[in-house]
């Protein structure tokens, strides 16, 4: 290699980042095995749960929206040309939270059920599955940025600020079902250390490398206070937030075979709030449940607007994502969802345990052996958070208009979510104004564009 190439590739600075994070929503990263469920969480040989550095880097690169042959901070490969990544990201191990200063540190792993439903809310054959999620925990994301002479126009910090801000604002999530509320992280503190090349800095860098994490954090000025950039996610998404109040009960079931527990129980999680408060058994409406209800209502609204069945299916697949297993011999084609729906925590809700008999609808008599106990939650407030990914063709504008119609049905109590909706479960009403990043004028324009497209039959 020539001396000119050596001078271009020489390292001029190293930047080290340590971001303290905790789970803001449950996390599910599969290990590819199915010993306990259809999708068990990833652990190493010692039983420790972790987020692979490859998963972190992959999610961050996907956020940037760059192909592998496009030059970026993560490097690229284009035939014989290429460049290695200037970011090095380590595995992030999930540590057990210290709850209320208790010495028994813990994280919570639970099992969730999933099933494909027909338009009539009956289960599809063979569409039942379950998977593990990690509900609570904290971790440290370590990032090393290497700046070379050829990168002299970049200080190496702005890219990291953007990526960390996107994580904090929910634009970057990790693992399974990240478009349905899982895998969101909350960043609490960020530490930064910089070392320029040269003999005068070599001793300090060697000392840093030999220090423990705790010792490094005691270095003066290493706490990075202005790391977050505001509204980074607005570059990639538009958002809609709908405040809601539960008018009756909610029943999104998880099942138990333990004699001391109810046969059916509303899905709950262990929740650590931003102020550090810990609560057990907090009822939630998962993003998968919201997505199913929103998708079903979207299809109905398109039908009511006289959109052809073929066109409606094409639009819904483009908006909500799909997997086509009939594309070819053993091949699948897939499209990612444009809509990201968060998991809704139901606050100030009251649990109620009831014991019921199944009734024969013909004789009105109880069915033998059909006695069961159910634990549901009644009342409470929550909010539905929806992000819509922007695209070059501006299809997101039409989706935003459709979501506004669906939101109107939700706040008026016309669209329910979860099970037992035939007996009044899962009905919400508005609990304040709907907010978002789309102005009223733009939303009205998007609605007109959607109506015109459907009327012209080009949807």
Image (cartoon, grey):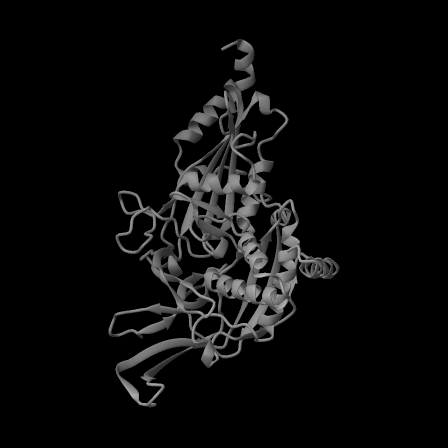
Between 216 and 23, the residue placed more toward the observer is 23
Image coords of residue 31 (percent x, y): 33, 46
Residue at left offset 42%, top offset 47%: 139
- Residue 448 image-quadrant placement: bottom right
Image coords of residue 252 (percent x, y): 42, 69
Find the residue positioned furthest to the top.
2
Q: Is residue 24 above or below residue 361?
A: above
**440 with respect to 399 (left or right):** right
Find the residue positioned furthest to the right.
441
Image coords of residue 389 (percent x, y): 59, 50
Residue at left offset 63%, top offset 53%: 396
Image coords of residue 82 (percent x, y): 51, 24
Q: Is residue 215 above or below residue 122?
A: above
Between 363 and 345, the residue placed more toward the observer is 363
Residue 94 appears anywhere in the view: yes
Residue 108 appears anywhere in the view: no
Residue at left offset 32%, top offset 57%: 103
Q: Is residue 198 above or below residue 17?
A: above
Q: Quadrant of the C terminus?
A: bottom right
Q: State how many labels appear.
A: 0
Q: Is residue 339 above or below residue 56?
A: below
**48 with respect to 12 (left or right):** left
């Amino acid at each position: 290699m020539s001396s000119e190439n050596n001078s271009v590739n020489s390292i001029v600075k190293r930047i080290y980042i340590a971001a303290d994070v905790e789970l803001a929503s449950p996390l599910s990263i599969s290990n590819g095995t199915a010993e306990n469920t259809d999708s068990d969480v990833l652990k190493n040989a010692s039983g420790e749960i972790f987020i692979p550095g490859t998963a972190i880097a992959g999610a961050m690169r996907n956020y940037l929206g760059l192909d592998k042959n496009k030059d970026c901070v993560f490097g690229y490969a284009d035939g014989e040309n290429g460049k290695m990544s200037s970011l090095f990201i380590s595995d992030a191990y999930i540590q057990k939270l210290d709850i209320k200063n208790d010495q028994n540190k813990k994280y919570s792993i639970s099992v969730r059920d999933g099933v494909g439903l027909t338009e009539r809310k009956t289960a599809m054959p063979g569409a039942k599955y379950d998977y593990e999620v990690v509900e609570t925990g904290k971790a440290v994301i370590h990032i090393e940025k290497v700046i070379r002479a050829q990168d002299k126009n970049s200080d190496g910090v702005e890219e990291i600020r953007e990526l960390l801000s996107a994580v904090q604002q929910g634009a970057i999530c990790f693992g399974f079902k990240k478009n349905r509320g899982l895998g969101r992280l909350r960043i609490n503190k960020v530490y930064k250390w910089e070392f320029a090349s040269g003999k005068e800095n070599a001793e300090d860098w060697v000392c840093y490398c030999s220090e423990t994490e705790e010792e490094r954090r005691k270095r003066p000025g290493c706490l990075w206070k202005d790391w977050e950039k505001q509204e980074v996610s607005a570059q990639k998404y538009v958002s809609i937030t709908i405040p809601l109040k539960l008018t009756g009960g909610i029943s999104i079931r998880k099942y138990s075979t333990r004699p001391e527990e109810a046969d059916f129980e509303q899905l709950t999680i262990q929740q650590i709030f931003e102020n550090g408060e810990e609560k057990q058994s907090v009822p939630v409406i998962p993003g998968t449940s919201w997505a199913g209800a929103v998708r079903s209502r979207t299809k109905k609204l398109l039908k009511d607007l006289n959109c052809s069945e073929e066109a409606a299916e094409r639009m819904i697949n483009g908006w909500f994502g799909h997997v086509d297993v009939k594309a070819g011999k053993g091949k699948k084609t897939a499209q990612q969802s444009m809509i990201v729906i968060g998991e809704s925590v139901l606050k100030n809700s009251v649990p109620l345990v009831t014991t019921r008999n199944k009734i024969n609808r013909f004789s009105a008599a109880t069915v033998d052996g059909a006695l069961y106990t159910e634990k549901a939650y009644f009342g409470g407030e929550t909010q539905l958070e929806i992000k819509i990914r922007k695209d070059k063709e501006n299809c997101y504008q039409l989706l935003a208009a459709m979501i506004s119609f669906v939101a109107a049905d939700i706040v008026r109590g016309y669209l329910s979510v979860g099970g037992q909706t035939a007996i009044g479960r899962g009905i919400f009403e508005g609990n304040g104004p709907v907010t978002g990043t789309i102005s009223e004028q733009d939303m009205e324009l998007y609605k007109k564009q959607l109506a015109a497209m459907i009327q012209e039959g080009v949807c």
